[in-house]
Amino acid sequence: MNLIIASNADSASINLRDRLLEMSSWRKCGEYDGNDMWEINENQGDYCKKGTRLISIDNIHIKAERIDEDYGKKENVKINNIIFLSRHKAASGKPSLTVHPIGNWGKAEYGGEEGKITPASPKIMTSLLREIKENQLEGFDVCFEATHHGPLLTTPTIFLEIGSTENEWEDKLPARALIKSLLEVKYISGKNVVGIGGGHYTPRFTEAALTHKVNFGHMVANYGVPFLNNEVIKNAIEFSCAEGVYFHKKAMKKSTYREIKENLEKENIVVFEQADYSKIMQNSYN
């Protein structure tokens, strides 16, 4: 079963949860963490299949360490994938709709554990990005974010976020756009890759995902590159079910790019170019 998690400590998360209950048919099926637990009544897109559950927690979600194990044991269920509903905060204040994997390449300042990552969901996350782009609101950016923050889980997980200020977090319009995307998402197959290089908002990886059949798992922004070595990259590949690596090389120091690329090739790890992906022939993102 798939699981969706909201946090009562996050106004955007509450907004998204309420829109999800409003825009699709659910039934109460018990309690978790003292809050109502819900199960969807019918198939809605490729993620919200009948039986998908929605829970709320009182703690902030980035601190919900190993909640998958706790929930699975208490409910005697196997969780296949998790989506957290969340706010996104940025100093720029730019309105945005984002998705990203979770984990820490270095220190764990916002949940999780130092140097550890949670399995990613490349097909789900990338397909969801495309669907959000279809439902993009005027004035809102749509993009991936690089892998960051907790919690640390063993189940493939992504965060679905409204940014970047309280005005957007509590606005029903962007919440409805994200929930519409979640309820209508259709998966597109493609090569799974790990992205390395560029800024936190991964413009190159976002552009590639919107135009080509490539699904991104973990993504390492330039600030995470100093923590990389072959073993860390191999782990990211494994946790992304990836076939290789894709660089935003123009956004990296040439010497750093060359060093990482040469080390990966010595380990027979495939380095992809955009020409290796087939194009998505029909879309309306513009």
Image: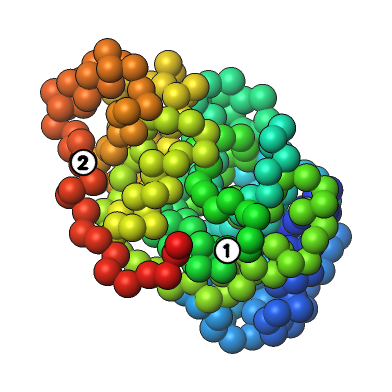
Task: Work out whether residue 37 or residue 146 is closer to the camera in this orientation and state it.
Answer: 146
State the image quarter where residue 59 is shown: top right
Task: Work out whether residue 172 or residue 242 is closer to the camera in this orientation and state it.
Answer: 172
Return the disc, 2 or 1, that comes first in the chain's sequence.
1
Q: Secondary structure at mark 1?
A: loop
Packing grade of label 1 (10 A; few <14, some 14-19, many >=20) is: many
Give the x, y percent position of residue 213.
29, 59
The reply to whether residue 87 is in sight is: yes
Q: Which mark is residue 272?
A: 2
Give the x, y percent position of residue 258.
22, 19
Residue at image point 42% right, 16% down: 226
Residue at image point 69% right, 35% down: 92
Residue at image point 56% right, 23% down: 114
Q: Please name the residue that numbered disc 1 is placed on.
A: 136
Residue at image point 64% right, 68% down: 177
Q: Secondary structure at mark 2?
A: strand
Task: Work out whether residue 185 or residue 47 is closer to the camera in this orientation and state it.
Answer: 185
Q: Amino acid at mark 2?
A: Phe
State the image quarter where residue 30 is shown: bottom right
Q: How many marks?
A: 2
